[in-house]
Image (tube, rainbow, N blue to C red):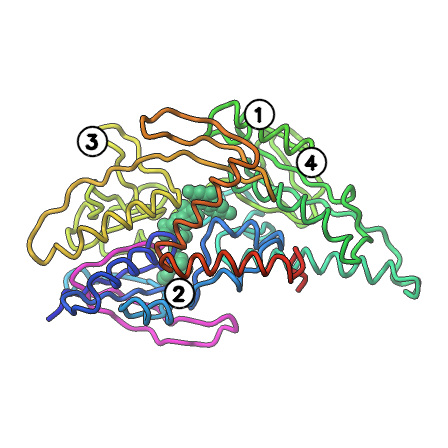
Amino acid sequence: MPHRIVIVGGGAGGLELATRIGRRHGRRGAVRVTLVDRNLTHVWKPLLHEVAAGSLDFSANDVNYLAQARWNHFDFQPGELCGLDRGRREVLLAEALDEGGDAMAPARRIAYDTLVLAVGSRSADFGVPGVREYCSFLDTTQEALRFHRRLLRRYLQAHARSSPDAGPEMDGHDALDVVIIGGGATGVELAAELRRASQRLPAYGLESIQPQEVRITVLDQAPRLLAALPERLGREAESTLRDMGVRVKCGVAVSEVTDSMVTTKEGDRIPATFVVWAAGIEAPPVLGTLDGLETNDRHQLKVRRSLQTTLDDAVFAMGDCAACPMEAGSGKVVPPLAQAAQQQARFLAEHLPRRPEGRSLPDFCFRNRGSLVSLADDSAVGNLMGNLMRDVTMEGRLARLFYSMLYRRHQLAVHGAARTVLAVVLSRIHRRTEPRLKLH
Ligand SMILES: Cc1cc2nc3c(=O)[nH]c(=O)nc-3n(C[C@H](O)[C@H](O)[C@H](O)COP(=O)(O)OP(=O)(O)OC[C@H]3O[C@@H](n4cnc5c(N)ncnc54)[C@H](O)[C@@H]3O)c2cc1C
């Protein structure tokens, strides 16, 4: 009987892992890989701010799990993780629903010999009143698309009102206040992308809201933007955003969000048509209900450096949903980044298929390759770690080029070299033949 590896979550880490093991071992039959995801398609999460702003057509960048499974010799099962039976080695799946809320697969159990949990993360609201009710999030493709459609609706309504033939009931001035809470990479990238989108929309006839009437504000509790990166880069990002006309307010803590206002503990009241919450992440709460497996206060599964959960050798966790120690005794955990999920996928792809032979796993070692933050179109800021671990800071077009390489690496792992080259060529053609903004 083949060794059954079940991977739950087909994101930056899980999809690469299933593809790598399937491609290398799936055909020989010694290992059977099953990937489970609650969706039928995958979009690489770091692209979601571009989906939200409308500058990326997600349908040209999504991966269909069924086709990917067929081409790479693994099985795909739609389903939502809802529990675990460690005694019987079965993972419990709730009914998988499509976008219309109809069932596409029933609730069921799937047996495993090795289980890998790679279900990612979601925004943490930190208990701030109004966040869940009134904020948009960039946690899933559906949420990013929903934000984009709301934004576009607002432009179309303004367009209809400004028509010379519109009746008096259509009177009213349209300005737009977008407040982004969180000045980390996601908030900064979204602000830059939205500013570019507001500058492009008039070119498609939607000039009723002029770019200067789109007021974008980024708020952060920390004293500066990009607090996780060197100070110089935070300052660089702030001055670029200000040059683009984005307001930046650091050192302010949001105390409440309503349908039209963001209030801070410092007493600011900021009008808001749309509020995007990008202030921090936590793992999905379902991980706290998995048959006694240990989690931390962000619901991440506690794992050893082999990525095995602390209480069960047969259950692994990787990516954003795992709290993996950086070094023994350091107290630090591997950061929730796509590059960490990718490195863990490579690590597990090499070592998991050897488990049936009784080999123990070595320690995973995270190599920080630096972080780059996109400032739309042709600019980025960030730092790269060289081979000698010298920290090289960069900005501008070169930084943007390195930024896009992270996605290319993901495409290479998922599609292989030939299809990645084809995808790059097609996206260049697409840019010339389609509007630069998604207008539906
Ligand atoms: C806007 C944005 C920009 C970012 N930019 C960068 C960047 O520039 N560089 C960088 O390194 N990182 C970046 N990140 C972080 C990066 O996206 C994550 O660290 C990375 O995606 C984590 O990979 P993962 O495999 O753990 O989870 P994910 O990629 O989030 O995948 C999780 C998968 O699990 C599935 N899933 C979730 N719950 C369930 C369930 N209950 N049952 C079944 N399936 C489930 C989801 O559908 C998804 O497919 C960015 C994140 C965002 C939101």
Q: Nearer the viewer, residue 66 or 305?
A: 66
Distance in Å between CA atoms under marks 3 and 4? 44 Å
Circle nearer the N terminus (2, 3):
2
Q: In this view, does 255 lie to the left or right of 101?
A: right
The residue under label 4 is: 244
**Numbered tag placed on residue 328 in the rendering:** 3
Position of the N terminus, as image quadrant, is bottom left
Hey, what amino acid is under mark 4? Answer: Met
Question: Residue 62 appears at what percent x and percent y?
Answer: 47, 62
Front-lying residue, 24 or 162: 24
Magenta highlight range:
90-119
**Residue type at numbered disc 2:** Arg
Rounded to the nearest angstrom, the CA distance separating label 1 from label 4 is 14 Å
Q: Residue at x 23, y 31 (%)?
A: 327
Give the mark nearer the N terminus: 1 vs 4. 1
- In this rendering, which labeled residue sits more in front, label 2 or label 1? 1
Whether the residue under disc 2 has CB within 8 Å of ligand 1:
yes
Q: Where is residue 400 in the image (x, y as percent from the top left)?
A: 53, 39
On the image, numbered disc 2 is attached to which residue? 38
* Local SS, label 1: helix
